[in-house]
Image: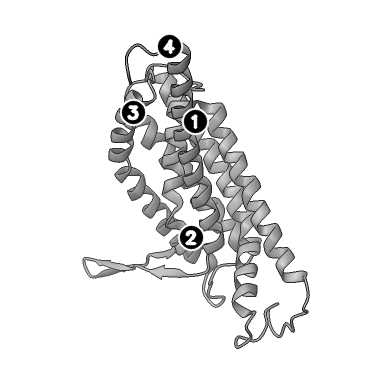
Amino acid sequence: MSQGLPYEYLDSELHERRERVFLILAGFFIGAMTMLNILGVSRFLDLSFEIAGIRVPFALAVGVLPYPITFLCTDFISEFYGRRRANFVVWVGLALNIFVVGFLWLGGVLPPAVDLVADGLPDTEAYDFAFFRIRQLTTGAVVASMVAYLAAQLVDVRLFHFWKRLTRGKHLWLRNNGSTLVSQMVDSFAVITITHFWANGLPIDASAPVWPQLWVFIFSGYVFKLVAALLDTVPFYLGTTWLTKYLQHDPTLPDPDLR
């Protein structure tokens, strides 16, 4: 930053810089949330593996892939902008996903009328089949996703600031991982159980016991999020170090409110 500039100019430039970073973080957060709800349970990846000759089932929904980004973004926002703004972004994400589902519903009821032949879907050869399949999966799972998302994100933000107060702004790795690992377990359990019991949106074998199958989905999703959370410690440290200087942030603040 150039020397000799008036204080008002420096303050205005810093404010613009902080708001620009906030917009980028919020944009990635909301984009990832919207993408994961549209992809949702539209496809499951079979990533099963063997340990000592024992096959370990591992089924991962494609909608989970962008999910770790949301927690990294809220951790950055919590660190630099405070709990209030982090919670605000969480609520905006919820509203936006309701907005998306509303237009998916609207697109299905407007003319021309579509002949639905089975399970509320048109014939597989029909041009509209892809839309109605996406609409069915997204609408059916969105309540589960949003309840789980809201609970997990609010838990994440609360725990992040709990650890930050407890350590007086030190031990960045603890509040980053400690908040995310607990909140992602909340999310994994909630989204799978609600998607199955409320939306019937999982590929469950009706001839086999239900809970062992559900635990495979819960375990698979959580392990993926666990590994992602541990790996994002490095970019979180690097990003925090750079943003501390770029945003002129005091890391010892218990709950910053950057403007």
Q: According to the image, label 4 marks what residue?
A: 6
Cα–Cα gap, marks 3 and 2: 28 Å
Looking at the image, which residue is at 44% across and 62% down? 216
Dot 3 or dot 4, earlier in sequence: 4
| Quarter assignment of residue 254 | top left
Name the residue that disc number 2 marks.
63
User: Badge 4: few (under 14), some or many (20 or more) residues near its Cα, within 10 Å?
Assistant: few
In the rendered image, the vertical position of residue 226 relative to residue 199, given as above or below:
above
Q: Nearer the viewer, mark 2 or mark 4?
A: 4
Mark 2 Cα shell of 10 Å, populated few (<14), some (14-19), many (≥20): many
Nearer-the-camera pick, 258 or 94: 258
User: Residue at image x 40%, y 59%?
Assistant: 220
In depth, the one of 111 and 117 nearer the eye is 111
Query: Left or right: 151 with respect to 46?
Result: right
Figure check: 259 above or below 47: above
> For the residues marked 1 and 3, what is the alpha-carbon distance in whole angstroms?
23 Å
Secondary structure at badge 1 equals helix
Spot occupied by residue 57 in the image (x, y as percentages of width and height): 37, 67
Measuring 37% from the left and 54% from the top, which residue is drawn there? 224
Q: Label 2 sits on what residue type? A: Gly
Task: Check whether the beta carbons of the residues at disc 2 and disc 1 lie within 8 A of each other.
Answer: no
Mark 3: give few (<14), some (14-19) or many (20+) Cα within 10 Å: some
- Position of the N terminus, as image quadrant, is top left
Q: Amino acid at mark 3?
A: Leu
Q: CA distance from mark 3 to mark 4?
A: 35 Å
Looking at the image, tell me whether mark 2 or mark 4 is earlier in sequence order: 4
Cα distance between the residues tagged 2 and 1:
29 Å
Nearer to me, 119 or 93: 93
